[in-house]
């Protein structure tokens, strides 16, 4: 009790502040999202996401090389194909955009690079939903079969980590079974276990060209009002074989992040999504905030809430700031 207890004693000296700091960020916490498009020499800025680009494979290689020099070596790939159809079948093509990108990056960088693939169909379907449609919603069980095929094709091309994002019931079990049957027992699964039907995804849909052409995704992504349901989703995916879990989005759901971390002894990721990113970029460009300080504080909030891994479009900037 004051005056014997003076908590400011631990704050007055900057070296002491660092010594007693509870939450630490380093570059190994981050996975950097990359958007791949067909062609060569393509680097197209996403209008709603400043400094985020759709890039052809040759440009992805250059971008990855610059990241590796900064110590950022973990990436998640999203592909935009040449053609789309009602089932998203090009996602399973051994010569598809993601499969070719995986092979190219592994050929160039080998074990120096760690590649995660987003496993879903929304970028590949002409209707923008996460699998084939039946009765005006995604056919859950048909999608499971296709997810297994897609996962195997990614691993055959060099994926190090599979991250299913479609919120299909049974997706982890189906993928694990397919991977194991094809001798990919060693490949871990990072499940988008707790993914909310959020308005924060808007800019991403520009980057991935995956906006639903009808309806929404509320029949398979979670209701933003629900907290307890997150336990059920997380527990089910763990029982099905998930090695890591994700909560998405991050900032508006930090209460859920903390509760999942407290409840389950398993590595936990968060996705610092496009809407969160674009709001900071917009406010910074208008001079309303100090971008670096805001981003650092935002990343600290995610780590403090319990995240072990952060998927973020700020990752390359973070690498630069942390290195300086």
Image (spheres, rainbow, N blue to C red):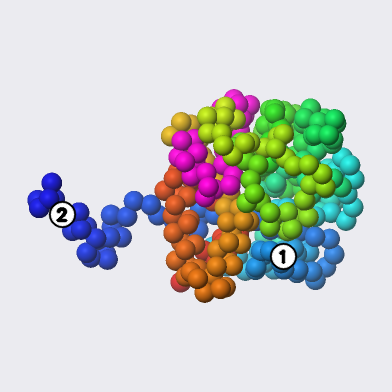
Residue 55 % position (x, y): 75, 64
Residue visible at 71% across and 67% down in the picture: 47
Above or below, comparing residue 108 to residue 201 in the picture: below
Question: Which residue does the image show at 85% across and 31% down from the upper left?
Answer: 134
Image-based side of 82 in relation to 212, left or right: right
Residue located at (60% from left, 26% from top): 236
Residue 275 visible? The answer is: yes
Residue 46's disc number: 1
| Residue 295 drawn above or below residue 310 | below
What is the secondary structure assignment of the residue under circle 2? loop
Disc on res. 6 = 2
Q: Is residue 264 left or right of residue 5?
A: right
Examine the rendered structure and indicate whether residue 17 appears above or below residue 168: below
User: Is disc 1 placed on a helix, strand or loop?
Assistant: strand
Callout 1 environment at 10 Å: few (<14), some (14 to 19), or many (20+)? some
Mark 2 and mark 1 residues within 8 Å of each other at the beta carbon? no
* Front residue of this view, candidates 320 and 51: 51
Question: Which span of residues is magenta-colored?
Answer: 235-260
Measuring from the top left, give residue 211's x and y in whole percent: 77, 50
Question: Is 83 colored magenta in this rendering?
Answer: no
The kind of secondary structure the magenta stretch mainly shows is helix
Q: Is residue 252 left or right of residue 135?
A: left
Q: Is residue 246 magenta?
A: yes
What is the quadrant of residue 241 in the picture?
top right
Residue 161, by quadrant, is: top right
**Is residue 231 or residue 222 the one in the foreground?**
222
Disc 2 packing (10 Å; few <14; some 14–19; many ≥20): few
Q: Which one is nearer the viewer's eye here, 36 or 182?
A: 36
The answer to which of marks 2 and 1 sits earlier in the sequence is 2
Measured as percent of width and height from the top left, residue 240 is found at: 63, 26
């Amino acid at each position: 009790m004051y005056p014997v207890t003076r908590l400011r004693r631990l704050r007055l000296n900057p070296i002491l502040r660092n010594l007693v700091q509870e939450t630490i960020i380093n570059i190994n916490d981050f996975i950097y999202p990359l958007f791949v498009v067909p062609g060569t020499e393509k680097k197209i800025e996403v209008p709603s996401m400043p400094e985020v680009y759709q890039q052809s494979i040759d440009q992805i290689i250059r971008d990855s090389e610059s990241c590796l020099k900064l110590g950022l070596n973990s990436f998640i790939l999203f592909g935009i194909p040449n053609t789309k159809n009602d089932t998203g079948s090009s996602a399973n093509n051994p010569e598809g955009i993601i499969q070719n990108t995986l092979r190219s990056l592994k050929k160039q960088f080998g074990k120096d690079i760690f590649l995660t693939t987003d496993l879903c169909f929304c970028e590949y379907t002409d209707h923008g939903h996460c699998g084939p449609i039946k009765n005006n919603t995604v056919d859950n069980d048909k999608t499971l079969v296709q997810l297994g095929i897609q996962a195997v094709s990614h691993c055959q091309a060099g994926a190090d980590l599979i991250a299913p994002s479609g919120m299909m019931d049974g997706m982890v079990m189906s993928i694990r079974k397919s991977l194991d049957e094809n001798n990919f027992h060693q490949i871990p699964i990072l499940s988008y276990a707790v993914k909310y039907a959020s308005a924060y995804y808007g800019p991403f849909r520009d980057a991935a060209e995956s906006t639903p052409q009808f309806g929404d995704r509320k029949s398979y992504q979670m209701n933003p009002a629900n907290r307890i349901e997150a336990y059920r989703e997380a527990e089910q995916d763990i029982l099905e074989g998930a090695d890591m879990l994700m909560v998405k989005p991050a900032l508006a759901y930090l209460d859920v992040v903390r509760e999942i971390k407290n409840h389950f002894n398993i590595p936990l990721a968060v996705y610092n999504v496009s809407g969160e990113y674009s709001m900071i970029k917009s406010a910074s460009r208008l001079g309303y905030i100090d971008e670096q300080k805001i981003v650092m504080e935002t990343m600290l909030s995610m780590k403090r809430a319990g995240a072990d891994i952060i998927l973020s479009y700020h990752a390359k900037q973070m690498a630069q700031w942390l290195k300086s």
